[in-house]
Image (cartoon, helix red, strand yellow):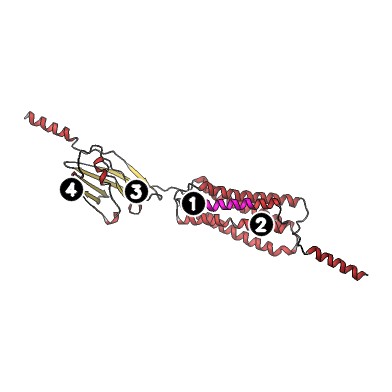
Amino acid sequence: MWPLVAALLLSSFCSGSAQLLFNKTKSVEFTFCNETVVIPCFVINVGAQNTNEMYVKWKFKGKYIFIYDGGQDNATMDSNFSSAKIAVSELLKGDASLKMDKRDAKVGNYTCEVTELTREGETVIELKYRVVSWFSPNENILVVIFPILAILLFWGQFGILTLKYKSNCTNKKIILLLIAGLLLTTIVIVGAILFVPGEYSVKNASGLGFIVISTGVLILLQYNVFMTAFGMTSFTIAILITQVLGYVLAVVGLCLCIMACIPVHGPLLISGLGIIALAELLGLVYMKFVASNQRTIQAPRKAVEEPLNAFKESKGMMNDE
């Protein structure tokens, strides 16, 4: 009898443990940015020499969703998990991980069952969904703050213009500036509401688009404010060029961020919006400086005004004679 017991023990030792052992993983997470979801299942004491000796089954909430029969080299899956698969070539290495498209992934507990000849084992892994903010909290704040700050600075310029400029000839321009400013303010506020902190979505992307694209109107508004007040100078031209540069950076950053689930180019977009706000600040300071050095801001004189005045004076002199 002792020789029989010894033979059985030796056989058990040579074939390894009677139970398959797993590298335990309690849970895994996936996010909106994942294209593929992988649920790990690793056997650490595989002894099979061929995949036809292995049998793999995956269950979700007690129901089999994927079965691989190594003897027949055949895989079947549930219709709700049509993209589920395993890497058969990795089975002999102990890797029976389940891979599926994100659209098929469902949150909950998955059971991996592996059979190797007379040995078997199972492990349970929980699949979780984690919400990841598209932008970081600080980036979310800056994306909203810079455009709003730029609009407030524009309204400061508009206030100086209406208080210092007294000519009736510019009433229509001021009304148009007022309407355009109100429209821009509304669009940015709507964009800020849509661009709420959260994961990437069409809603967030639309809000960001409203915010960034609409800031281009500030370039036209500031140009018209300068022309209405005192015309173009080398300093105002430099301000406008800076603002255009900032807008280009913001638009490029917007395109790169929308095309990527993780906005690695967020700093580029934010830098562009910051430059736009800086240009508005410089414009306000310059207007304040000019306004403080003259009692009333005069409109740019047209080239025809001086010949016309000369004609009127000569006509008056002829009448006197």
What residue is at 57 percent from the left and 57 percent from the top? 214
CA gap, disc 1 to disc 4?
A: 49 Å
Q: Earlier in the sequence, mark 1 or mark 2?
A: 2
Q: Earlier in the sequence, mark 3 or mark 2?
A: 3
Residue 59 on image: x %, y % = 25, 49
Residue 19 versus residue 74: which sits nearer the camera?
A: 74
Q: Are marks 1 and 2 in contact (CB under 8 Å)?
A: no
Q: Are marks 1 and 4 in contact (CB under 8 Å)?
A: no
Residue 196 in view (yes/no): no
For residue 71, the mark is 4
Residue furthest out toward the bottom: 319
Foreground mark, 3 or 2?
Answer: 2
Q: Earlier in the sequence, mark 1 or mark 4?
A: 4
Foreground mark, 3 or 1?
Answer: 1
What residue is at 11 percent from the left and 30 percent from the top? 6
Residue at mark 1:
256
Classify mark 3: helix, strand or loop: strand
- Main SS class of the magenta portion in the image: helix
What residue is at 11 percent from the left and 33 percent from the top? 8
Q: Which amino acid type is shown beneath numbered disc 2?
A: Tyr
Q: Which residues are magenta?
A: 241-252
Classify mark 4: helix, strand or loop: loop
Classify mark 2: helix, strand or loop: helix
Residue 316 placement: quadrant? bottom right
